[in-house]
Amino acid sequence: MSSLLYQQCQKGTLALSVFASFLLLQLLWTRYSISPRLPSSLPRDQLSLQFDSTNDSIWEDFPKRIWTTAPLSLTRVKKDDSERVRTWMDLNPEHRYELLTDGGAETYVKDNFPDHSRIVDTYMGIGDFILRADLIRYLVLLRDGGVYNDLDVGCLKPIDLWIPAKFRDNTSVVLGVEVDNDFGENRTRQFELVNWTIMARRSQPFMRYLVESVIDNLEKAAAKHNATLTGFKPQRQEVIDVTGPMALTQAAFQYLSDATQTTVTWQNFTQMKRPQLMADILVLPINAFGAGHQVQWSGADEDGSALVHHHFAGSWKSSHSDGPTQEEKKAAEEKEKAEQDKKEDEKKRKEEEERQQKKEEEERRKNEEATQKKEGEKAPTGKVIENIASEKDMLVRAQRSTNTTIVSS
């Protein structure tokens, strides 16, 4: 009897073990299988920027870190910026707030990407400060994760409340809509995702893809201007397209298109009223991160959906015009004047050559006419002499004939 009971217990224990293993496998599958395939538009070796290859590290919870950048340390920022920093600290006391200065950002890149020379060389080679500011935000989220926000962004709700519970386990990156309006006479649709606030787990495929895409953009833009990264001076729209919100938006569309095997465009997200999870990227409606940015259809910011408020300080825009800078305009004007002067000098030289040529031709013509005139004056004199000689000869002949006649008589 005891032997039979023992066997039954063993069977029960085995069944429980099998069932527990099944549940564990199902949990692991649910948690890790949603990570999308890496986009095929870039070589795999360029996307191998993982720092921890295990799924546990990739899918650990969102790090409680808040990042921002500024030229100076936190104690030296303006009062308005300091007050906005305080909103992040007050609403997120468990998060670690980190501000990277220009020097601190360089040190961060060198220390955290020692095996990725393309990243280090690109960042250290960039001469324009706003291009650096865009790239460093993507790099810190790739390496360490957390929340990045610009210095002119204030926090309105605790970060832990940003992601709806039903999406949290399957979300690796959180993005928000910035622009979703019709503009201009032709009502052209413009759509952009925010890059002043981004949330990400660390070492995520999309962040790797975004970094590589931005580096590609930088190299192509500099080459287009026949410049090095150090000498590349972008205009305002180039900043937006090469490293800014439009670069982020295009990278997201390309990444999601590959992950879902469909064509993802702005039409997938236009006029969103609720968060939308696609692959592992959660896209929030425009009021979430875009509060403070007026749109035609989204309704009031006070509906409770705003998570941050962007104050649009836009200090970088004053040094990045839509056209050439004053120095570039002056240089262009001087170059144009030099080219015009050169053309005028060339024109005068040709005119002088033509005048000289005409003068020489005129002198040659006059000389020819003079020569012909002299030759014409000599010809009649010869005929007169010839005629006189003939008349004399005829007279002599006549006299001779007369003398001969007299003698004969």
Image (cartoon, rainbow, N blue to C red):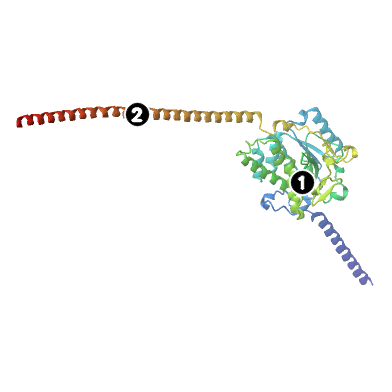
Name the residue rendered at 69%, 50% in the picture.
Answer: 47
x, y percent for residue 243 = 71, 41
Residue at image mark 1:
202
Residue 369: mark: 2
Name the residue rendered at 26%, 28% in the picture.
Answer: 380
**Residues marked 2 and 1 touching at CB (< 8 Å):** no
Q: Secondary structure at mark 2?
A: helix
The image shows residue 39, relative to residue 234, as above or below, that is below
Mark 2 vs mark 1, CA separation in Å: 98 Å
Residue 75 visible (yes or no): yes
Which image quadrant for residue 218? top right
**Is label 2 or label 1 in front?**
2
Name the residue rendered at 85%, 50% in the picture.
Answer: 167
Q: Residues within 10 Å of mark 2 (few under 14, many from 20)?
A: few
Q: Secondary structure at mark 1?
A: loop
Q: Residues within 10 Å of mark 1 (few under 14, many from 20)?
A: many
x, y percent for residue 112 = 70, 42
Name the residue rendered at 80%, 54% in the picture.
Answer: 34
Q: Quadrant of the C terminus?
A: top left
For marks 2 and 1 on the same chain, the one whose residue lies earlier in the sequence: 1
Q: Amino acid at mark 2?
A: Glu
Q: Is residue 55 left or right of residue 212?
A: right
Q: Amino acid at mark 1?
A: Arg
x, y percent for residue 24 = 84, 58
The image shows residue 54, relative to residue 305, as above or below, that is below
Q: Nearer the viewer, residue 105 or 149?
A: 149
